[in-house]
Image (cartoon, helix red, strand yellow):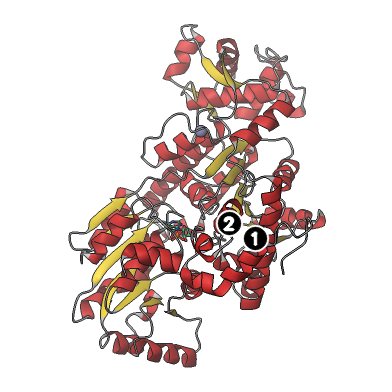
Amino acid sequence: MTKEEILRQYFGYSQFRQGQETLIDSILAGKDTLGIMPTGAGKSICYQVPALMMDGITLVISPLISLMKDQVGALNAAGIHAAYLNSSLTPGQYMKALNFARQGRYPIIYVAPERLMTDAFLDFALNARISMVAVDEAHCVSQWGQDFRPSYLKIVEFIDQLKTRPVVSAFTATATSQVREDIVRILKLREPTVLTTGFDRSNLYFAVKSPKDRYASMVNDLERHRGESGIIYCLTRKTVEEVCGKLIQDGFPATRYHAGLSDEERRRNQDDFIYDRSPIMVATNAFGMGIDKSNVRYVIHYNMPKDMESYYQEAGRAGRDGEPAECILIYGGQDVVTNQMFIEHNQENDALDPETRAIVMEQDRERLKKMTYYCFTNDCLRDYILRYFGEYGSNYCGNCSNCLTQFETVDVTELAKGIAGCVESSRQRYGINVIIDTIHGANTAKIRGYRMDENPHYGELAKVPTYKLRQVFNHLLMEGYLSLTNDEFAIVKLTEKSKGLLDGEETVLMKMAKEQEPAAKAQKMRKGRAGAAAGEMGEGEQSLFERLRALRTQIAREEKVPPYIVFSDKTLVDMCMKKPRTREEMLAVSGVGKFKYGKYGERFLECVRGAKAYPQGALCL
Ligand code: ADP
Ligand code: ZN
């Protein structure tokens, strides 16, 4: 079979995505290959397709048990024999799987790196024909990456043992040049083909909000996503508990995940989420590695995370199926303080010598600052992200909250002078809140205690709402008119640039959101937003979608697999659009391969055919 035929037959896709073909061709030509692609770009297919075309076995090294299980489940569902070998198997199961492997039953075997150098595994591998070793999450070999795994260093040791060196391919979503060089060096890739596709995920909509009431604002977003699956990330375990508790009280099917729960509960809750029994997951950043759920329609950050790396990784868990999905970050000033505290008290740094520790903390603070600016910027959010990761974006994407807001350029020189003047006259001793309260003329014990009510700028901008003062303040920080000390106190300091401002030589312009009628804004949002997965379908299609989804849930239950393993949301949407009547038409739906057609095709066809005959809301079970 050609690679195109395999793609169609087993995976049900008609075309390769950007980069996939180059990587596959390189592997098939026997070259070592390194693919760097963002989450959701479709890395797995890059080694799975050639694995089915090569003689011999492909070993896939993967760091996480859940990831392996998911991938193997998806392959088996597509009619491809695959197995995994890791510590979740009993010794008996493990031996059985190895025996099947010896008989050549599996073209693809997932194996945990810890297993590679064990006697039992080596005994198998040294006598088998291994045509490729594919290293998933390859950044785990690098100490510079976020997820260094010492067991990954065993991979080369293992490859060196083999009589014939297989093709080695490696894949990751982490792109810094240091990590990339480490992968090539440590895995000893031989003149590899290296391909990096862009980091942009155009199906993701990005938004930042700083509402008065976080919870209410989030519930609004959840209402728009009724019935869909999403993740809500919180900074602390306590917040996870609170938010999850409230959501359940308010009737949302939520579950929770954080490091303080028992292994047993974590596993159960994760499964509830994956199987869509509790489609809303409230979690700390402990959740998500290895979660391959493709139908996550939104990721809401209830707090600002510690850096852009974490943010993009977590937000990137939305919309892996390529359908529109939303990434919403809810920002509050307190988040900065909490993150500062994490940096100050990071126990992982305790082992470091004082000098290194200082450097690490300094880098952490710098990353936190860049994260904070993401929340402040009025420019295109996607552009900000891409620039952060070293790519050039365009300054308008049309699919982020800033691009969809109408801004006007406002002269804020007077406000800026007032703020800088207040910082100067109080001898650069206070943080943002004291300065803003002073200038706004707050009559609080704290202000009186600091005798800021005697400051010449006290109450100078009493008429300007504090949220606006804050916006201007943030703008001054971003533009370098003011700075903050890099410690937990965050004291406001003047800079070179502030002098020009105070001397009246500078004009400060800033983009501010135009006040809009809420209704008009909502309308615009709805139009501008790429639309939730099913959002752009007509009413008839919507109800067909619901019926297909119910059928999918039913089948998933029967087969005890997560619903998205049966068909992805994207496939169901395409089915609604194409309304296939025949086998041929059904096979033209994205994600329907021959094997899956054989298993489910008729039932889904019947569901589509019967659509008209069913009254609204009836299900095709
Ligand atoms: P990654 O490992 O890069 O995060 P996956 O391999 O999990 O991404 O793929 C993400 C999704 O994209 C999966 O649902 C996969 O089936 C789908 N996909 C991959 N390649 C294609 C393609 N050529 N056409 C359509 N969908 C694809
Ligand atoms: Zn944008």
Q: Looking at the rendered structure, which numbered label has been put on residue 483?
A: none
Image quadrant where residue 329 sits: top right
Mark 1 touches mark 2? (CB < 8 Å): yes
Q: Label 1, on which residue?
A: 608
Count neighbours of disc 2 (C-alpha within 10 A) and say few if under 14, some if 14 to 19, many if 20 or more.
many
**Viewer-closest of 58 and 90:** 58
The correct choice, above or below, for 454 with respect to 142 in the image is above
Q: Position of residue 268 (x, y in %)?
A: 65, 72
Q: Label 1 is placed on what type of residue? A: Val
In space, the residues marked 1 and 2 are separated at their CA atoms by 8 Å
The correct choice, above or below, for 5 with respect to 475 in the image is below
Q: Is residue 511 left or right of residue 32?
A: right
Image quadrant where residue 116 sits: bottom left
Q: Looking at the rendered structure, which numbered label has been put on residue 575?
A: 2
Which residue is pictured at 46% across the width and 42% down the height?
A: 367
Q: Position of residue 339 (x, y in %)?
A: 56, 46
Q: Label 2 is placed on what type of residue? A: Met
Quadrant into which the N terminus falls: bottom left
Which residue is pictured at 31% across the width and 74% down the height?
A: 154
Q: Position of residue 556 (x, y in %)?
A: 63, 71
Quadrant into which the C terminus falls: bottom right
